[in-house]
Structure formats: structure tokens, C-alpha cells
Image: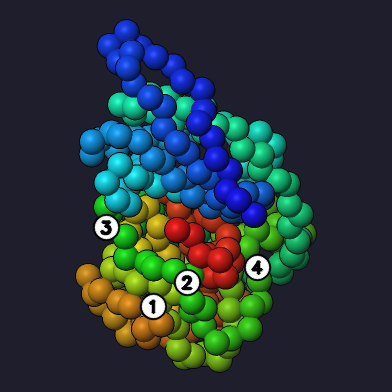
Amino acid sequence: MLPIVATGIIFLSATASSAQAYSVQVTPTRPVLGDTLSVKIQGSSNGVTPTVTVDGTTYQAFTLSPNTYRALIPTSPNTKPGRMTLAVSGPDGNNSIAVNIGDRTFNTQYITLSSDRAGLEGTDYEFDRLDELRALRTPQRYWNGPMAKPSTGYISSVYGNRRYYNGVFAEDYYHRGVDYAAGNGSPIYAPAAGRIALIGKVSDGFVLNGNTIGIDHGQGVTSVMIHLSGFAVNEGDMVEKGQLIGYMGATGFATGPNLHWGLFVNDISVDPVPWRYEGVE
């Protein structure tokens, strides 16, 4: 299938009457909730990076080649399905591109927690560190091609699941990642190249997520790996796809040994599956 190609709607200003709007390609062609939209922008901006705004949020584009840029727009189960308008702005003019976001059905899980875990809450320290990780917009792109499975275990929970905890529905909750189950101490691998931007330890206050690794893949893409039993890397290390980074555990809010892999694009949890199979370029 061909990507969506749009010349958009051109708005000329008095100060830039000769400007030409950008050529824009959006993939995938039929996005659904949880997909990451890759917005490729071509123009003659002479190095000035355009922006893409969706529902009041402006996303940074990064240079792919001279006068070619790419922005990543995340969607999630909390995104409203239907018409989404992408407003591309820069020295070449303004484009307004309509994309249809398809609806999607997510499973429901029923989780029973023991009394000692039912009231488990995180600390400001771990939340602040994770916020800092997801806020990264490193200009350099480290990932290349489809991402890899971070574990050889079986998938015990998929992205987007809704949940009841002890019979109470968790409003606005969705499972922000994919869980892999295997034996305690099983190896965990980097799904893509990047920089280890976060090592969070239970002993330092990571009581909800447990031992945690955060990877900066560049350009607003980050991975979070939680519930680890141990680490094979240090904060600041550069890693390659498939490199051993840690070991599966049941630390934090976990009912048994598992790895939770969360993939975030511009601070929003997206479905990692398309990144593994098709890749996002």
C-alpha cells in the first residue's frame, strides 16, 4: 500500500507570500489506536526544522537528510478514534493533513492482589526519574530497523489491556507495554540500540516499578524495562540491539517473575508490536 501523501492546505502570510507548503507522507496507511504515525516532511526549509501539531500538542521533527524531516506522532487506547488533523508548520508554509485513526478492541484482565500489595504506591523519586526519561528528545537516532524481543519468555500480557484490580475497574488505565514471563534471573536484552539513561533500584526508591532500566533510543523514543532482579549495565552505557542488559525478576508491583517492556514515543506509551515487526522509520 502506498503511504498517505498530502500537499495540504496552504496558508500564505504577508511576510512569506512566496512560501510553498511541504510535501507530507504519513505511515502507516491505516493506523489504529496504539500505532505510531511517522510523518515524513519534504520542503526547502534550508535547515529550519518544521513542526507538527496535533490537538494542541506540538511535536518536534528531526532531520533525515537535507530538506527532509520526520516527526513521530504517538497514539494510544486513550486517543479518540476517527479524524486526526496534523498541522505541519515551518518556513515553507502550513499544511493541514487529515488522518483517520481506526478503533481497536482491547482485552480485559482481572487482577487479584494480596493485602500487602493492594495499597502499594510509588515514590516521587521514581516518578520524577521516569518523567525525565520520557521527556528526552535526543537529536541523534540510535535505533535502526525493527526492534527485537527483549526476552525469550512467553508473552503473558499484551499492550492496551484494561484491568480490574480486586474487582474494581481501573478508569483510564491501560497496560502500557508488553509483559514477558520466564524464570527468575532469565536474561533481558536491549530491544534496540541506545543509551542507558536510567538505572532505578528498589533500594533507591523504585518500590512500585521495582528495579528498572530506561533506554534512550533517540528522537523521543524510550524503552522502560521494569521488575528486574539485577542489572548487566550501568547508567550512561551505550548498548546495541540484542545486548544483555539485565535479569528478569519480580521486584515492585509484580505477581511473579516477568519483564514489563514499555515503549514510549514523545511521552506516550505506544504499542511495541509494530516497532518489532514492521519497524518505524
Query: In the picture shown, does residue 155 fall above or below 216?
Result: below
Disc with the residue nearer the chain's start (3 vs 4): 3
* Secondary structure of residue under mark 3: loop
Q: State the mark number for residue 140.
A: 3
Q: Quadrant of residue 274?
A: bottom right
Q: Are marks 1 and 3 in contact (CB under 8 Å)?
A: no
Which amino acid is tagged 2? Met
Which amino acid is tagged 4? Val
Q: Which of marks 1 and 4 is in front?
A: 1
Q: State the mark number for residue 147.
A: 2
- For the residues labelled 2 and 1, the Cα–Cα distance comes to 7 Å
Please give the name of the residue rendered at 45% of the width and 58% of the height, measured from the top-left corner: 281
* Secondary structure of residue under mark 4: loop
Q: In this view, does 178 lie to the left or right of 20?
A: right
Which amino acid is tagged 1? Lys
Q: Mark 4 points at which residue?
A: 158
Closest to the observer, 260 or 242: 242
Q: Which of marks 2 and 4 is in front?
A: 2
Q: Are marks 2 and 1 in contact (CB under 8 Å)?
A: yes
- Mark 4 nearby-residue class (10 Å; few <14, some 14–19, many ≥20): some
* Secondary structure of residue under mark 1: loop
- For the residues labelled 3 and 4, the Cα–Cα distance comes to 29 Å
